[in-house]
Image: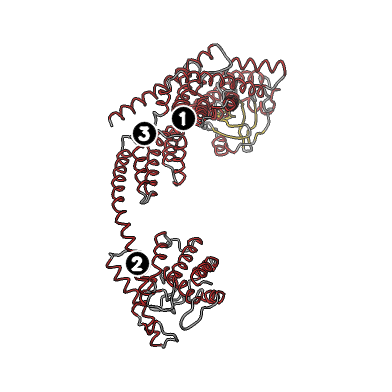
Amino acid sequence: MKFGIRKSKYNSLLRVLLVCVGIAVNVVLSSIAFKFKLPIYLDTVGTMSVAALGGVFPGIMTAVMTNVAGALYNRETVYFGFINALAAIYTAWFIRERAYNKIRNIFVFIISLGIVSGILSTLIQWFFLGAPQNRAITAFIDAAYYSMGMDRFLSFILISIVSSILDKGISYTIAALFIRFIPVDKRKRIKNSGWKQRPLSVSEAKQLSSLKADSKHSLSMKMSFMLLGCSLALTAIMSWVGISLYYETEKHQRAESAKNAAQFAAEMINPYMIDDYVDGGDSVPGYDDVKETLYKIRNNAVGVNYLYIAQIRDDGFYVAIDLGAEGAEGVPSGTVVPFEEDILPYINDLLEGKLIEPVESNNTMGWALTALYPIKDSNGICRGYAGADVSLSYMAEYMWNFLFRVILVMSAFFILILAFGLWSTGTGIVYPINSIVMSIEKFISAGDDQKKLDESVRQMRKMDIHTGDEIERMYHIICDMALNQTEKIRSVRRFSDVTLKMQDGLIITMADMVESRDSDTGAHIQKTAEYARIIVEGLERKGYYTEKLTPKFMSDVVRSAPLHDIGKINISDRILNKPGKLTPEEYEIMKTHTTAGREIIEKAISVVKGESYLKEARNMAAYHHERWDGKGYPEGLHGEVIPLSARIMAVADVFDALTSARVYKPAFPLEKALEILTEGAGTQFDPKCIEVFMEAIPEVKVILSKYNHQ
């Protein structure tokens, strides 16, 4: 045990060392490529090596941490971590499937990985980072544009794909050479270092993974989704808090800028001239000078897009001076601008000349914040308002950009977390548990086959589960239990063989006792047993009474069928072999063979301590003359209240009676016998039993030919 623990720790350290070396190789090579402005990145050499040697999770860990470390010399690398992680997943799959054995597969691997990486890298750089991040690629794009007039985006995609294919080809070659220098035993040890049991082959792992399909909710997926959900929730909360804080801070600063600009403009305007500006516009003396002053105020106010002077009346804003947006003409003086919906709640205060807080609006002019400052004369009468608008639309763009960048950065970590969840639960929980489950299933399916039992125990002990927790303890307990159970079964089987022989001998002996007294029931017990077998197998084939038709039940019915008339041993020879029709009194005596048979078999059951095969014999002996409609004997049971074995025997017994000669009647033709059975379906017999019997007429004819010599 201690040796196993030391070995496991050594293997874990070896795996950690491999990841660290892979990260170092990636960082060194990619920093060299960045420094010399090469059109390739070389940041997947270590990733491919680690994924090929250690599997998916170490490969993804190498990929993600490479891009985090790469931010030391190029901060934009963190946005490409998920592409590197996808390369690790693809490489691990490629190596696991042994697709590298063919040169053609290697080329397909490199080209497909290069195409996907190139396209994803292009989309990130073009739409989120605004421009190509590699100077060499930028130069190629410019050359394609100026020399051939090629669309920049299209040329960017094509050049990125070619560059990425070249990059992945070089990376794969270096990784393959690096792996070849590692001794085979070390490679094998690294590959198997993550297992908490005997390492499984690819086919064995797939076989165990298929067991998860039988589970409604896989344990590994539960754990992975829990980790991923927590990570998403934490990221969403932190992003929301960051965006909210930024929004409130920036909004407050913009509001202060707008208020200051509006106040400053209000102080620079002569209140008594506003009416003239509204009516005369630029024809009023001094209008241009005031407008120039307002331009200076707007240009020096951070974020202010619009600055204007207006009077507020009942029907709208009456423009006195409007600068308009930068590079555009303002609204002409005297123009009446209707109130926007967002300003309506403040109209009364504005008409009274009150100062209001900046108003946030989202209208045809965009998302904006408006500050209005009253312009009052020396008597305190409000002559108009100075207004300043700051746009908030850029904040939405910034927040979306921020959110997308967070998604790009976190996507790599989400993949890492998901991989960790699948890997840790897979190697530490799911595979060990599924291995135990499969070994138990093999043990159970072995039944009483001693060789299979011994082999299943040996295979179980070879699993060598060493998770170091409750699963390992459970594994050892199950191994001990299976070993003890195997030895017990070995002993029980000897007693079981003797018991089965005694059972069969008892049935044959008791049936022979009855048959030897009945002068005209030759081969009756053999034929009825065969008919019972046909019916019970037909019911199983049709899917009827599935809860009842267990293999043991079917065996008990066929083996116990010869005992259905055991009660006739109590009937006198005079009545039993009477050539003519029985009198009512004699018929009543004959009917007692059912209750007598039940009593005889119940005594036998008590003697052999409740052997279950005799329970169906008792049911058949007691109730094979009951009718589906409840008009039978001895108890008048009806429908499915009648035991299934007795309903089966009723059909078998009547059919044999119809097709066999008796001292009091000749044998009926087969067609007539089948007609009588069909007419009795639903009244005398279970319709399902009749149905399956009729479907097996070819078999029935074989039995008739065998025993009746027809």
Rendered view: 427 above or below 66: below
**Mark 1 crowdedness (10 Å alpha carbons): few <14, some 14-19, many ≥20:** many
In the image, which is nearer the foreground, mark 2 or mark 1?
A: 2
Q: Which residue is mark 2?
A: 614
Q: Quadrant of residue 155?
A: top right
Residue extending farthest to the front is 709
Judging by the rendered image, the residue that carries numbered circle 3 is 196
The quadrant of the rendering that contains the N terminus is top left
Q: Are marks 2 and 1 in contact (CB under 8 Å)?
A: no
Residue type at mark 3 is Lys
Disc marking residue 685? none
Residue located at (39% from left, 65% from top): 559
> Under tag 2, what secondary structure?
helix
Measure the alpha-carbon separation of dots 1 and 3: 16 Å
Residue 205 place in picture, x, y as percent? 44, 37
Residue indicated by mark 1: 56
Using the rendered view, name the quadrant where residue 526 is placed: bottom left
Q: Secondary structure at mark 1?
A: helix
Q: Is residue 388 visible?
A: no
Query: 315 or 659: nearer the eye?
Result: 659
Disc 2 + disc 3, Cβ < 8 Å: no
Q: Secondary structure at mark 3?
A: loop
Dot 1 and dot 3 residues touching (CB under 8 Å): no
Q: Is residue 608 visible?
A: yes
Amino acid beneath label 1:
Val
Task: Residue 600 in the image: state x and y as whole percent.
Answer: 31, 73
